[in-house]
Each structure stands twice: as C-alpha cells, then as structure tokens.
Image (cartoon, grey):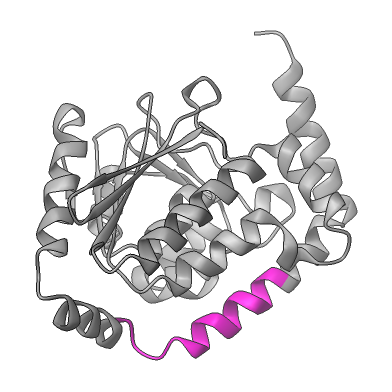
Amino acid sequence: MTDLVSTHRDGGVVCVTLNRPQKKNALTGEMYDALLAAFETASSDQDVGALLLSGEGGVFTAGNDIGDFLASAQSAAKESASTPASRFIRALARFEKPLVAAIEGQAVGIGTTLCFHCDLVYAAPSARFLMPFVNLGLVPEAGSSMLAPMRFGRARAAEYLLLSEPFDAETARELGLVNAIVPAEELRAHALSKARALAAKPRAALLATRRLMRGDSEALYAHMEAELGEFWRALRSPEAKAAFTAFLEKSKAPV
C-alpha cells in the first residue's frame, strides 16, 4: 500500500489524508486503490461512524496525475470499470456512512466532484474548485453532470461544467457545495470536530436519515454508468489525445 495516502483512526472517525504535496496531491492509481481500501475498511467496521477526507501541503488535490491516469486507462483495455479511478468513484457514491471533507487550495476534477457525495464540506479561503473535463476533451464524472445542475441550478452548472470556469470558496458556499469557510489553520480541526459529532450520533438513526436525504440512488448510479461510458469513448477521441498531449508538454516545459 502506498504512503501517499495516510489513514488513521480518531475514535469513530477514519481520517484519510492525501499525502503527495510535492505533486499537489495529484492522484495515481495506487492512491485510488489506497482510498478504496480506506473506504472499504470504514464501511465494514461497525465502530466507524464517519470518514474525513483532507490533503497535505495546503492543497486538496490537483486531480488525476495525467501520465499515470493515461497509463492506467491504456492497461485497462476496453474496460473503464477496471481502472482504479472508476472503482473509487463507484465506492464513493455507494458509501453509506457520513463523509466530511476539508478543502484547502486546489480541488480539481475529482477534487470537486467528490464534494457532491459529501455530507459536510468545509473550505479554507484558499480553496479553488475546478471541473476541467470539457477542456480536456472529456465529460464529467462521479455523477456531477446530474448533481451539479441539481445543486447549483442548470445555468450556474453550465458555467462550471461547460465553460469549465473555476470558482472560489465563497462561491462554493453560495452554491451550497460548502457548508462553511474556515481559516486554514483551523480547517482540519473544525472538520474533524464535525466528523466526531456525526460519529457520536445514534448510528441507525444517522444512517437512515442520510439514506432518506439522498433519496433513490438508482437514478444516480445509472447516470454515473452513462457518464463512464461517455468518458471512456471521449478518452480515446482525437480531441482528448490532443488536449492531454498539450497538457503533458506544458508540464515538461521549464519554468
């Protein structure tokens, strides 16, 4: 298991931290596997009442590590479902216990879309959200093409999904993606206190209330499968190949 994702228990809370700050916590397949393992452990442990996600180094995550992601996609042949990212997205949506996120700095791609699946999201003033899928010749993932219009309204969702415009912590709070903006030095402690509070609630009532709030999940799961199919087709398109090539060349350029 990679040390680029650290996991520890704090009472009834599983704390999961992305720990690749030198690469802005960009996610590799190995990191997705570690995240998946943490979710599975938290799900099966009856003493766990909540899971907290955060990132080291003043950043949540810059999204997928593009080089690693492309290598993973190629090795998966025609089965997008077999990639670590796809497996994690499914686990994220099906996780039944409360999810809390502490967002600082960049939250790109999955860094933003996973917030739609969280029950409580707290952000530092530095938080910057971005869903750049269309810019990369791709389509959104993790159900965000359904959840963003539901949460933001269709017009605002178009700004962030079609135009791929970034938005800050204050805008995220206004849109209902973030519960509160917390000073960076207090962020993790604040989010942990809320996760502890959730974990201390009567468990059956907590989980039942969460299920009732989320409603029928089958429509979301079906939408996510449709997204994955479109994503996989788009990934093999000339547009996506050109966008990724340009991105990788830019990343290799001297500063």
Q: Tell me what residue is drawn at x 19 percent, y 46 percent.
A: 191
The span shown in magenta is 214-228
Question: Can residue 154 be seen here?
Answer: no
Give residue 26's quadrant in the image: top right
Q: Residue furthest top?
A: 255
Image position of 35 (left or right of 13): right
Give residue 58's quadrant in the image: top left
Please tell me which residue lies in front, 49 or 58: 49
**Quarter of the image containing the N terminus?**
top right
The mark tally for this picture is 0
Q: Is residue 28 magenta?
A: no
Q: Position of residue 186 (x, y in %)?
A: 14, 33
Q: Tell me what residue is drawn at x 77 percent, y 48 percent.
A: 72
Q: Is residue 225 magenta?
A: yes
Residue 89, placed above or below residue 25: below
Question: Can residue 73 be seen here?
Answer: yes
Image position of 174 (left or right of 92): left
**Quarter of the image containing the C terminus?**
top right
Q: Position of residue 57 (x, y in %)?
A: 38, 23
Q: Position of residue 160 (x, y in %)?
A: 49, 56
Please tell me which residue lies in front, 112 or 25: 25
Residue 92, placed above or below residue 247: below
Q: Tell me what residue is drawn at x 57 percent, y 49 percent.
A: 32
Residue 128, placed above or below residue 80: above
Q: Main secondary structure of the magenta part?
A: helix
